[in-house]
Image (tube, rainbow, N blue to C red):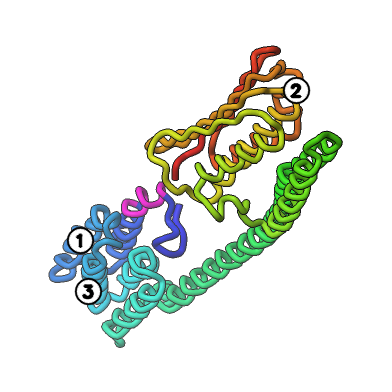
Amino acid sequence: MMGVVPGALDARGERLAGPVFTGVGLAGLAACVVWGPGVRGITLVVVVAAAVWVPLLIPLFPHRRAHPWLAAGYYAGVLAAATVLVAREDTFMGFASFGYPLAFVLFPARWGFFAVAATATLPLLAADSDSRSPTWVLVLSMAGPLLYAAWFVGAESEQRRKANVRLEAALEENAELHAQLVAHAREAGVLGERQRMAREIHDTLAQGLTGIVTQLQAADGPDRDRRVEQAKTLARESLGEARRAVQALRPEPLLEAQLPEALSRLARRVSETSGVAVRVETTGDARPLLPDLEETLYRVTQEALANAEKHAKASRIGVTLSYADDLVLLDVVDDGVGFRPGDRGDGTGFGLEAMRQRVRRVAGTLSIESAPGGGTAVSAQVPAL
């Protein structure tokens, strides 16, 4: 039920400690009255006063921490009664011993020792040196404080030893968990960097090389010089984008212009290299976004246009960038051959999955709608923060 210090009492101990200690004090007082030579006069008055005073511990005990001066006043009353009774009859040393355990449940440990010292000193000083007390009274008055202090120190040391054992076990467990977290973080970092490089290579080198090959294959016709020049331009742009991808920098078009203008430039380049009519429209109040959001929307548009050019055989592509209050929406719609989403466009192609990963990384959503012969619509939605 009880620990060695006030804070060590559990909920049940808090409820029972007041009545239990009251019973111990009254029992000690009653035993001294019974075994004494007789109680009368002033001694009887003090005994009655002590019998009335001791039960006040019951309402006081739950509030001892909030009102320490009330606890001190109560303990002083018990000590005063014990001192007066011992001065009149040594037998009441037994009642005075009630102060030893009471000190440690009423006060913090360091103040409890002072209370114990006062309990051990004042009744002895007040005792009649000429009286011959029973042996058990002398043993109790001398050995009581020593035994209780030894018990208190031993219990306190045991509690600290157990606490240290629990602390060491917790530290070992935390060290293992920390090592696991570091390992997982390292693995996640490596995987994340691999995925980033894979997306960047796909969006820059792969698409750039595809465009170069397309331009060189078409360089045998009358517009050979234009096709070769476009291939050189694509090669230079792809090399620059590759360097920027390695350094984890933003796409160069976004450094030179805001997102709507960067998308318009991208559309013009696609139109020039593929011959597909690409129209870009911006609605709402265009405003700068966080770099990650703008890069995500740019790369999604880039991938959607590349897919429409390479796979959909589209003749027209529409790009719409819409600024709302708290959202930015991107729609890329083509009139190409389309596909069945479960066959290729539902996450099985790396480009489509890369788009999904990019959009998820910025807390957005991506949807792809298509059907054979019905064209394709790619819609991305990101928070405008």
At 65% from the left and 62% from the top, the residue drawn is 171
Residue at image mark 2: 344
> At label 2, which amino acid type do we have?
Arg
Can you name the residue that lies furthest to the front here? 222
Which badge, 1 or 2, is on the more N-terminal residue?
A: 1
Residue at image mark 3: 80
> At label 1, which amino acid type do we have?
Trp
Q: Quadrant of residue 129?
A: bottom left
Per the image, is 177 magenta? no
Query: How many neighbours does mark 1 have within 10 angstroms: few (below 14), some (14-19), or many (20 or more)?
Result: some
Give residue 338's mark: none
Q: Secondary structure at mark 3?
A: helix
Residue nearer the viewer, 72 or 65: 65
Q: Quadrant of residue 93?
A: bottom left
Q: What's the distance in space between the residues labelled 3 and 2, CA to CA?
A: 93 Å
Which badge, 3 or 2, is on the more N-terminal residue?
A: 3
Q: Secondary structure at mark 2?
A: helix
Residue at image mark 1: 53
- The answer to whether residue 136 is seen in the rendering is yes
**Left or right of residue 248: residue 114:** left
Residue nearer the viewer, 237 or 71: 237
As drawn, 40 above or below 256: below
At 67% from the left and 37% from the top, the residue drawn is 272
* Proximity of marks 3 and 2: CB atoms separated by less than 8 Å: no
